[in-house]
Structures are given as C-alpha cells and as structure tokens.
Image: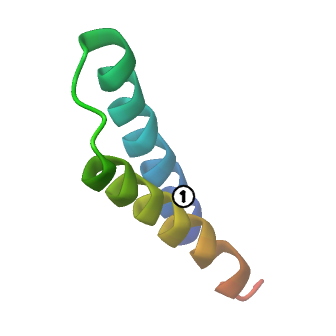
Amino acid sequence: MGTGYTVWTGVGAARTVLLGIVLFDEPATVARLTCVALIVAGAVGLQPTTPLG
C-alpha cells in the first residue's frame, strides 16, 4: 500500500507542476522539470523493487 501511495503522490505532484506551467504561466525551467522527472522516476522505481506479498 505504501508504494501505491508513493506512486500516486508522485504522479499528483507532477501533474500539479505541469498544470501550473500550462494554466498559470509558471516558468518551465530545466531545474524544475528535472526535479519533477526525478520525483516520477523515484516513484516508478519503487514499483518493481517492492516484493509482492
């Protein structure tokens, strides 16, 4: 359950940032997009390393 929560939190954070960029003209800097990519990569990376129980 913790992995699922982490994945959905990461996806939600990424969507929030992207909506801010699209809807509110927030700057889409390389640093910001890199950080979002790292959040998503970390959340997705947890999925295959979690043992099935």
Residue matched to label 1: 7
Left or right, 40 with reference to 52: left
Q: Quadrant of residue 48?
A: bottom right
- Residue at screen point 66% across, 73% down: 47
The residue nearer to you, when weighing 16 against 49, is 16
Q: Secondary structure at mark 1?
A: helix
In the image as oriented, which residue stretches furthest toward the right? 52
Left or right, 21 with reference to 12: left
- Residue at screen point 41% across, 61% down: 39
Q: Position of residue 37 (x, y in %)?
A: 46, 57
- Residue at screen point 45% across, 34% down: 15
Q: Can residue 35 be seen here?
A: yes
Work out whether 27 lies above or below 13: above
In the image as oriented, which residue stretches furthest toward the front? 30
The residue nearer to you, when weighing 2 against 35, is 35
Q: Can residue 1 be seen here?
A: no
- Residue at screen point 72% across, 89% down: 51
Q: Position of residue 18 (x, y in %)?
A: 41, 30
The residue nearer to you, when weighing 30 against 23, is 30
* Quarter of the figure with the N terminus: bottom right
Picture mark count: 1
Amino acid marked by disc 1: Val
